[in-house]
Amino acid sequence: MAIAKRELGRTGLQVTTLGYGAMELRGAPRARDITEEQAETILNKVLDSSINYIDTSIDYGLSEERIGRYISHRRAEYYLASKCGCLVGAPPAPRGQRGQHVFTRENVVAGVEQSLVRMKTDYLDVVQFHSSPSRQTLEEHGALEALLELKEAGKVRFVGMSGTLPHLADHIAMGVFDVFQIPYSAVEREHEAAIATAAQAGAGIVIRGGAAKGAPTEGKQAGLQWERWRRAHLDDLLNGMTPMEFILRFTFTNPTWTRRSSARLTRRTCRPTSMSWSKGRYRRTSTRTLSYVSLPQARRHERVGDDRRSL
């Protein structure tokens, strides 16, 4: 069955509502060991399943090279998004640590050029600044100017930001970013208002962490996302659904994109039992329409997840 498509903001790109985040193709030591044969199978199965949006990054180990090696001959079938600002030529960071980022003109240009070679393409559909740098950082050494020049040159079609608070509000206000990649799920809602603001301004929204990194799934149940799930007492709202089904339905039915994109939806909109926040936990309400309310802002954002949802 074909996956529904939606227009990615003002880009006009018709992207599938489910995208593929290629971070796990990076391989050992920062992720599970994946053979070349497995990588080839995964990437081709993604396209065979009609997914047309693939997201990767310079610092995802072998990910970009494997994309180029195994599906560059199918380039017309997918939109390709990568990142910039990751230090070109840097060794992989130790597991659990973030790689070094340098937001200079030279490093941005070198990174995009390297990505083009690795993925055997002459253009990237979206290039996003990684690590949510401040506006000052983007501007003081020419990083933003360089990416906009690459867009003018046709090597990059659209400019994006992989953004989080506290800098996300400034990024939206700058008005230069066509796409925002933002973390969001039923257990990570700190950016809900920012997502709505960016969408109202016409930007495309790509959700990462939309499946909460699979935290409530049997066999995982560890880490920040699991702790948030546990403390929110969401198990009593499942009503026969698996935790993963609940989380995905919650993500896909956020009013920000269901209202804006309803005319383009081709699949039936699924809605879990509605809920509201009261006295430190969720509770059911009397209606079946999902009620979205903001979680308390007591906890700072922590980057999680590699699942991507184009919304």
Image (cartoon, helix red, strand yellow):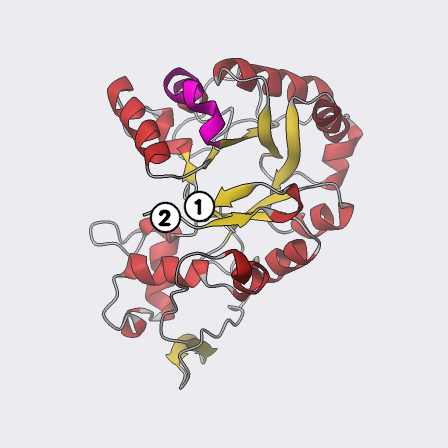
Question: Helix, strand, or loop for circle 2?
Answer: helix
Is 275 displayed left or right of 140 in the figure? left
Is residue 108 visible in the rendered structure shown here?
A: yes
The percent coordinates of residue 208 (x first, y second) are 47, 46
Q: Where is residue 145, by image quadrant? A: top right
How many other residues sit within 10 Å of disc 1, few (<14), some (14-19) or many (≥20)?
Answer: some
| Magenta-drawn stretch contains 68 | yes
Using a 10 Å C-alpha cutoff, classify the residue at mark 2 as few (fewer than 14 neighbours), some (14 to 19) or many (20 or more): many
Please state which of residues 68 and 278 is positioned toward the viewer in this rendering: 68
Residue shown at 47%/17% (left/top)?
A: 91
Say which residue label 1 marks: 304
> Looking at the image, do the residues carrying marks 2 and 1 touch, with CB atoms under 8 Å apart?
yes
Q: Give, as a three-letter code, the residue at label 2.
A: Lys
Residue drawn at 31 percent across, 59 percent down: 245
Relative to 254, is 147 above or below?
Answer: above
What mark, if any, has residue 213 been given in the picture?
A: 2
At horizontal 42% and vertical 23% (from top left) the residue drawn is 74
Q: How many numbered marks appear?
A: 2
SS at badge 1: loop
Alpha carbons under labels 2 and 1: distance apart: 7 Å
Residues shaded magenta:
66-78
Rendering coords of residue 54 (x, y %): 46, 34
